[in-house]
Amino acid sequence: MTAPPSTPIVFKTPTPEETARPGFLAADLHVHTNHSDSSTRVQDLLQSAARQGIGCAVTDHNQVGGAVEACRAGSGVPVIPGIEVSADDGPHLLLYFPALSDLTDFYRRHIERKKREGPCLAIKMTTAEVLDAREGYHCVAVEAHPCGYAFLNRGMRQGIERGCIEAETFDRLDALEVICGGMARAHNLAAADLARSHGLGRTGGTDAHLLRELGGVVTCAEAESVEEFLEAVVHRKTVVVGRERTLAEKAMMGAAVLPHHIPYAIPILRSRIRETFFEGMGK
C-alpha cells in the first residue's frame, strides 16, 4: 500500500500494509492486562505487538500499573500511556498522555482516592469531574464505545438522552472511539456519525481482554512519536481500521473476564443498577 485508505474508517481486518508503513504508526488504543480484568501479561502483550509491528495503549480500568510496566519495559514497542476511567454517571473515558509521569500524577491526584471496592467499578467522579481533573495535563480525552451497552447509561449519548449528562460535554472531548472490537457494527457506525457531527477525532481499539484480540482494530497516523500520534488524533488526521468480534469471540472473552468480576458480584450489581437509573445524584 503506497497511500493510506481514502476513507478514515475502514471495517476490515488490518493487514501488514496498514500497520507497518514507514513514517506511520498503527496502534491498538484500547487494551487491558492482568493489572485489571484480563489475564494478559504485559510482557506477552508487548511481544505480540512487536510481532505485528504495532504500538498499543494499555488502558486498564481505573489502574495505571499495566501502563507503567509497559512503558518501562524498554521493548521498543510504541506504548501510549493510558487509562480507562469508568465515570459514576456511566461513560468510560480513555485518557492518553504523551508522558508517563503525567499519567501517574493524574492517577495519584485524582483517580486513586475515588475508587470503589471493586477495581473495575465506576469511580466516585462524574464524567464532567473527570474532564475537569484532566485540565492542566497534556492529555487526550476519548470516549470509549460512546453508544453504550443496551439499557445501561454507559455511553454519553444515553446519558444525555436521559438527562444525567449535559449535552455540551461532548465538546470537551478530543475524539470518540469509532471502532470498538467489543461493540456491534451498528454501535460503531453510530459512534462514527457522532464524531462527524460533533467535529471530533476518531480512534479505534479492540478493548482486548485476551492476547489473541490484540491488533484486531488499529488507529493509524503519520507520526514518529507518541506525542505526534496523539496530536494526529486531536487534529482528526487518523485512519481507523478493524472489525468487531464475532459472537463466539465475544463469548470467549466474556468467559475469560468473568472470574475477575465474580469476587465483586454484589458491588457490580449495585453499580449496574446505579448506571441504569442514574439521575445525577448519589455519588
Image (tube, rainbow, N blue to C red):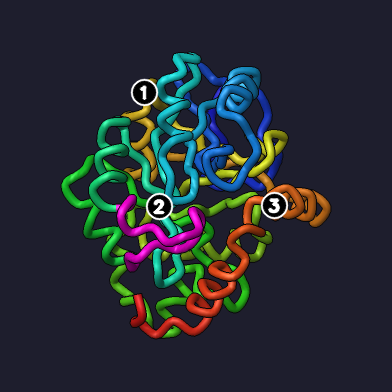
Instruction: Tell which circle, 3 or 1, labels the residue nearer the N-terminal end.
Output: 1
Q: Earlier in the sequence, mark 1 or mark 2?
A: 2
Local secondary structure at mark 2: strand
- Report, in whole angstroms, how far the alpha carbon at label 3 lies from the one at label 1: 37 Å
Looking at this view, is 79 or 27 the one in front? 79
Q: Is residue 1 visible?
A: no
Q: Is residue 117 magenta?
A: yes
Where does the image place residue 105, in percent across and percent down from the top left? 25, 39
Residue linked to disc 3: 259
Residue pictured at 35% horizontal, 37% vertical = 230
Q: Residue at x 33, y 50 (%)?
A: 112
Write the residue at 28% across / 58% down. 131
In the displayed structure, 183 sits above or below 65; it is below
The image quadrant of residue 173 is bottom left
Q: Position of residue 157 (x, y in %)?
A: 46, 73
Q: Secondary structure at mark 3?
A: helix
Q: Is residue 8 magenta?
A: no
Which residue, given by chain and number where applicable, does mark 1 sit on?
Answer: 225
Q: Position of residue 210 (x, y in %)?
A: 69, 40
Answer with left or right where residue 154 lies relative to residue 111.
right
Q: Residue furthest left?
A: 136
Q: Using a 10 Å C-alpha cutoff, classify the residue at mark 2 as few (fewer than 14 neighbours), some (14 to 19) or many (20 or more).
A: many
Q: Is residue 179 positioned above or below 22 on the image?
A: below
Amino acid type at mark 3: Pro
Q: CA distance from mark 1 to mark 2?
A: 19 Å
Amino acid tagged 2: Val
- State the extent of the magenta-drawn residues as a range: 111-126
Q: Decide if residue 211 is on the left or right side of residue 151.
A: right
Q: What residue sits right under mark 2 in the picture?
A: 142
The mark lying in front, picked from 2 and 3, is 3
